[in-house]
Amino acid sequence: MSPRDNILPHAALVPRHVAVVMDGNGRWARQRFMPRFFGHKAGVDALVRAVNAFADRGVQVLSVFAFSSENWKRPDEEVSGLMSLVLVAVSKYLTKLARDGVRIRIVGDRSAVSDKLRQAWEQAEAMTANNTRITLAVAFNYGGRWDVVQAARRCVADGLEPERIDERALSERMALAFAPDPDLFIRTGGEMRISNFLLWQSAYAEFVFTDCLWPDFGEREIDAALAAFAQRDRRFGAIRPPEVAMAGSA
């Protein structure tokens, strides 16, 4: 028996959907006397490793907060560097991720990004559309409040009467309607807040906060988070968990 066998939960207790706020790239770079851009680059490398690690452990969907709608307020140089990094990342890793069975979905408001970036996203989605090993949902120019608003607007645009706008109608129009709600929500970097990420979808998620900076978030930290999730008693708002509610259900 390997050390990992003592840590990893039984397959039935593995979350179907893990959401991650990848925090700490800038601090990681600062600790090494590097510009923030190098931290973001190391963060992309860490993401590619994490996607495969989560897939190896049976996670079906990994959603990551890559760029929030509030991140436009960062210095222009940093924002420009992040946009360029996305293009570089697609060029560098798309073929590998496609070969590894990863399906890529981009969620968020695409109207504010360049045509070149939109085309790169469309290429990534098209190239990986038939992959089934794991879905990587990259939230870019995304905000949880924006998501609720756009879903409500879609209800109106679809002609729904007010009495027909319920939780199901909104859920079906959310940016991640293609995925089950997150079972496990992880934030790295030591902060203990969700920062407007998947507000609606995370209503019954289990939370794990870690001081580990995102570029250093590896298999040991993933195993620890999954082990913590497996020990949670998920009640879904009830005194007792429903008989049909098992760890990994949304």
Image (spheres, rainbow, N blue to C red):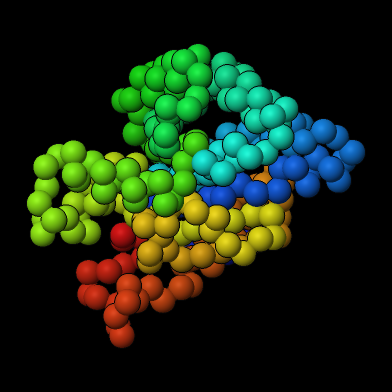
Q: Quadrant of residue 133?
A: top left
Decide if residue 37 is in sight here: yes
Q: Is residue 206 left or right of residue 42?
A: left
Identified at 31% across, 67% down, the residue is 246
Q: Quadrant of the N terminus?
A: bottom right
Q: Residue 221: horizontal and vertical position, in percent?
A: 64, 55
142, 202: nearer the viewer:
142
The answer to whether 228 is drawn above or below residue 136 in the figure is below
The answer to whether 244 is drawn above or below residue 59 in the figure is below
Q: Quadrant of the C terminus?
A: bottom left
Q: Is residue 45 left or right of residue 11?
A: right
Q: Residue 174: horizontal and vertical position, in percent?
A: 30, 46
Identified at 42% across, 52% down, the residue is 145
3, 182: nearer the viewer:
182
The answer to whether 176 is drawn above or below residue 207 in the figure is above
Q: Residue 232: horizontal and vertical position, in percent?
A: 46, 73
Identified at 22% across, 75% down, the residue is 243
Decide if residue 223 is in sight here: no
Q: Residue furthest bottom?
A: 239
Q: Residue furthest right?
A: 33
Q: Is residue 24 left or right of residue 139?
A: right
